[in-house]
Image: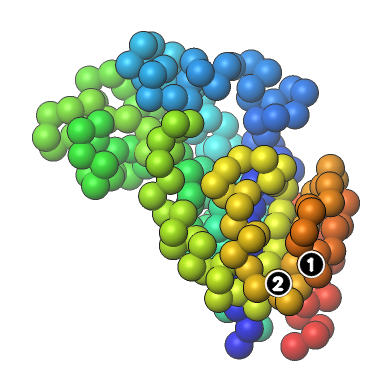
Amino acid sequence: MKKIVVLTGAGMSAESGLKTFRDHDGLWHDYRVEDVATPEAWRRNMDLVLEFYNERRKNLLDARPNAAHFALARLEGKYDVNIVTQNVDDLHERGGSIKVLHLHGELKKVRSSVDPSLVYELPGWELKKGDLCEKGSQLRPHIVWFGEPVPLIAEAADLCERADIMILIGTSLQVYPAAGLIHYVFAGAPKYYIDPKAVEVPYIPKLEIIRKTAGEGVPDLVDRLMSEV
């Protein structure tokens, strides 16, 4: 069974009603990265950071997987599929995908601010000041903030090195280290890049660009790949 690695970004969830970060009306239009998504912001204004992620969780409760999420789950019928996502939502899982690696953390989880290994499912959407881990420290969002290491990047790179096919969906390929994962894939492996604003990626052979939204482009590509097996 051929191995497929799928790298997804914010454009994957946009059609589910979740705002992207970099579009003209995206989240960074309303908030500065430095104010809500860095360790310094957490130390400087915990209330604002908690409010930002609580709002994201409320939005996620109303979101539903879209056609792209369901199509990727269908792909597992004939391929060994690993999804590496930059997204912190759980729409891949709700869409039926089994193997999902969250590079940048998970919105529905929280963790200790003194021991990163203490990770908890958050009941509901609200994390409050004074919510503590078992060691007595404030719980924080289980999110990889700008300026923090990405613990799962080595595992993601290993998956890419063993991939027979790579699919990139709804990502700007501007956020590192995730954007560099394409360079770990065997040069001769087919690669597909689905995004309405996709641009050529220099020095990447066998890359097919599909300038469609995830909801349009992914089901079409999945149909094509399923027919080739």
Q: Earlier in the sequence, mark 2 or mark 1?
A: 2
Circle 2 sits in a helix, a strand or a loop, which is it?
Answer: loop
Is there CB contact under 8 Å for labels 2 and 1? Answer: yes
Check the image and name the residue furthest to the right. Answer: 211
In the displayed structure image, the side of residue 56 where residue 201 appears, left or right: right
Q: Amino acid at mark 1?
A: Pro
Q: Residues within 10 Å of mark 1 (few under 14, many from 20)?
A: few
Per the image, the residue denoted by label 1 is 205
Residue 223 occupies quadrant = bottom right
For the N terminus, the image quarter is bottom right
Q: Residue at x 20, y 33 (%)?
A: 114
Image location of residue 186, percent across then percent down: 65, 73
Mark 2 surroundings: few (<14), some (14-19) or many (≥20) residues within 10 A: some
Q: Quadrant of residue 165?
A: bottom right
| Depicted 45 relative to depicted 210: above or below | above
The mark found on residue 187 in the picture is 2
Q: Position of residue 164 (x, y in %)?
A: 65, 78
Residue 113 x, y percent position in the rendering: 25, 31
- Asked whether 138 or 74 is in front, the reply is 138
The residue positioned 57% from the left and 32% from the top of the image is 59
Q: Residue at x 46, y 54 (%)?
A: 153
Q: Can residue 106 be seen in this snapshot?
A: no
Q: In x, y percent, where is residue 177?
A: 54, 47
Looking at the picture, tell me which residue is in the foreground, 64 or 145. 145
Asked whether the viewer can see residue 206, the reply is: yes
